[in-house]
Image (cartoon, rainbow, N blue to C red):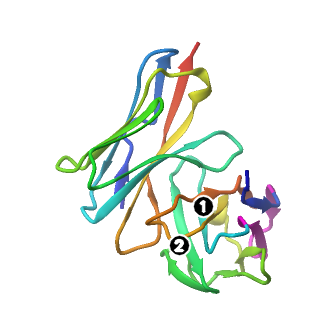
Amino acid sequence: DQQVKQNSPSLSVQEGRISILNCDYTNSMFDYFLWYKKYPAEGPTFLISISSIKDKNEDGRFTVFLNKSAKHLSLHIVPSQPGDSAVYFCAAYNNAGNMLTFGGGTRLMVKP
Amino acid sequence: EPEVTQTPSHQVTQMGQEVILRCVPISNHLYFYWYRQILGQKVEFLVSFYNNEISEKSEIFDDQFSVERPDGSNFTLKIRSTKLEDSAMYFCASSEVDLRNEKLFFGSGTQLSVL
């Protein structure tokens, strides 16, 4: 039951370029989406979120785009920095529950 | 910055033994959670806890699992009789209000290895 899917297990990007991480979901009840970043030996840390009433949310170098009709969201990091190298998890929840459903994660490697 | 702390960072146990994983959530938070991540798989929800009772639990959280807030600061996850497939990284998390309005703060996890 993969309600939230991140199809790319890994992504490699040159420093200074744009990183685009993608996420698809199947549950149309999801109405709030988040991105978490995880370094080795640490717990996930919140990065950015977006409500289903919006299609874009920006915070510094990070922008999340939501395409509800396609049930797709993406995280853009511009410009990418080596310190951005981590595993990025897409997560979602719906108005009926108090739990996050996570995707499988994408490992981003930003090369200097 | 306040943080969620988990102990121990690593726990090794024999199959069939009981384990207790401990967490100290952020002090003014009211909602508490356990998630786990089996190696190479996604982070999965186990249980949420509010006002001294379970508010939601997943199919994973069967009768072998229990949670408790024994005092004003600790939040524990007990696995009564561990199985090999319980081996995973267990994350505790807390939030100040419910998830609709506030992000989750995760601890750094307890790596449980069941032999």
Q: Secondary structure at mark 1?
A: strand
**Residue A49 position within the rendered picture, expressed as x and y whole percent measured from the top left:** 43, 49
Looking at the picture, how far across and down is residue A85, in whole percent? 58, 29
Are both tags, 2 and 1, on one chain? yes
Instruction: State whether residue B33 is above or below residue A31.
Output: below
Instruction: Write down the chain letter for disc 1.
Output: B
Is residue A43 magenta-colored? no
Q: Residue at x 36, y 61 (%)?
A: A1
| Position of residue A80 measured from the top left corner of the image (x, y, whole percent) | 50, 22
On the question of residue A2 being in view, the answer is no
Taking depth in this image into account, of B58 and A62 the one nearest to the observer is A62
First in sequence: mark 2 or mark 1?
1
Give the Cα separation between the discs numbered 2 and 1: 10 Å
Q: Residue at x 65, y 50 (%)?
A: A43
Check disc 2 and report its element: helix, strand or loop. Answer: loop
Number of the label disc, if any, that sits on residue B60 = 2
Which residue is labeled 1 in the image?
B36
Identify the residue at horizontal 62%, vertical 57% (top origin).
B105
Residue drawn 66% across and 61% down?
B90
- Write down the region rendered in magenta: B9-26
What amino acid is found at the position of numbered circle 1 in the picture? Answer: Arg
Question: Which of the 4 quarters of the picture holds residue B19?
Answer: bottom right
Q: Amino acid at mark 2?
A: Ile
Label 2 packing within 10 angstroms: few (<14), some (14-19), many (20+): some
> Could you tell me if the residues under marks 2 and 1 are in contact, i.e. CB atoms within 8 Å?
yes
B47 w.r.t. B86: above or below: below
